[in-house]
Amino acid sequence: MKEVRGASTEPPIVEIRGVTKRFGAGRPAVDSVDLEIPRGELFALLGPSGCGKTTLLRMLAGFETPTAGEIRIDGADVAGVPPNRRPVNMVFQSYAVFPHMSVFDNVAYGLKVTGAPVAERRERVREALGLVRLDGLEARKPDQLSGGQRQRVALARALVKRPRVLLLDEPLSALDAKLREAMRLELVNLRIAVGITFVFVTHDQDEALSMADRIAVMEHGRVRQVADPAALYEYPSCRFVADFIGKVNLFEASASAGRDREGRLVLEVPGLGALPVPHPEPVQQGEIGLAVRPEKLRLGESRPDAEIVFEATVEDFAYYGSETRLFLVTEGGVRLSATVPNTDRGPVRIERGARRFVSWAPADTLVLTE
């Protein structure tokens, strides 16, 4: 469970102002990004491959130089400051541990390069290994460790330098699903224990939603929305974010129907008709995005007393253990997906071709103006 903190009056630890990065001609890899990351936050850069998230992380680390804009870390402009002089450290996707060195020597390497005394190196390595729960494994080589243990070595090696900001590039992608889930919790608890800022890159929505205090969703080098996980999922700002974060039923609608007597926006959706939506903000006439999450849909064999309800046929379904996803088509030819929790043991009691009534609450409808 993520720690909930109050608003901080301290200046942000990371400030990114108008940062752009170009590699030759064409669309920039990072395009005019503005971000502020508070101290102690676990901040995620989320997006599909090629959206610019890793390039942005590498600019924070000093491995890439911005074409334009400014990056400030702990109040200082880091333009021209090499990676080893910045108050950050980076954990790479491949972990990049030295295979010929012991766990102790891997973790101590950075301190040795900077000339830290032997006694200090020993004490700081012991402390770092304790934080990542590798006590007693100092003498082992990386090939004697599991994938999760090698990742902890990489974390300890980064933490032993006591950075102000820890940068993580797809830190869990090399692990299997079960270990990845366990390591998510470990990283969250580790960040709380050390009290420093974590900035991590991921393309995995579940990883970002379950770990981060806030998330920046990127597309084509731009930040489309920054919000905490719940706000990002329940109130996406645009079609891209709604479609990228989780599953969603997405429709094109028209706002030409105006508002009903209760002041709700009435949207016309081809094949579904007029749908009332509690949306107080004004919208322009014309095409507008409309969305509803699959878990918000309710299915029944008899017609419910609901404002938004349709009769539909089950075309297919997929069983996922804890839930079943149904794929339906309405009488108007609109395709919907619905998620049903599997609360009863035994086979799924649904057949292809079955008729069901599908409904959802007007308040669960998302209006997307971008």
Image: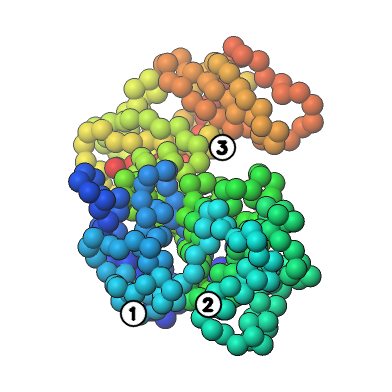
**What is the crowding at mark 3: few (fewer than 14 residues within 10 Å), some, or many (at least 20)?**
some
- Residue at figure coordinates x 71%, y 33% from the top left: 321
Q: Of the residues under marks 2 and 3, which one precedes in the sequence?
A: 2
Q: Circle 1 sits on which residue?
A: 76
How far is the residue under mark 3 from the one under mark 1? Answer: 46 Å
Q: Circle 3 sits on which residue?
A: 295
- Residue at figure coordinates x 46%, y 72% from the top left: 88
In the figure, 203 relative to 21: above or below? above
**Can you give x and y, in whole percent of width and height, for residue 259 in the image?**
30, 38
Residue 224 seen in the figure:
no
| Colour style of the rendered protein structure | rainbow
- Quarter placement of the N terminus: bottom right
What secondary structure is marked by label 3? Answer: helix
Q: Circle 2 sits on which residue?
A: 113
Which mark identifies residue 210?
none
**Can you give x and y, in whole percent of width and height, for residue 58 in the image?**
39, 60
In the figure, 364 relative to 84: above or below? above
Residue 36: image quadrant is bottom left
In the figure, 365 relative to 129: above or below? above
How far is the residue under mark 1 from the one under mark 2? Answer: 24 Å
How far is the residue under mark 2 from the one under mark 3? Answer: 53 Å
Q: Nearer the viewer, residue 73 or 156?
A: 156
User: Which amino acid lies under the numbered mark 3 shown in the image of this protein?
Assistant: Glu
Closer to us: mark 1 or mark 2?
A: 2
In the figure, 3 relative to 312: above or below? below
User: Which amino acid lies under the numbered mark 2 shown in the image of this protein?
Assistant: Val
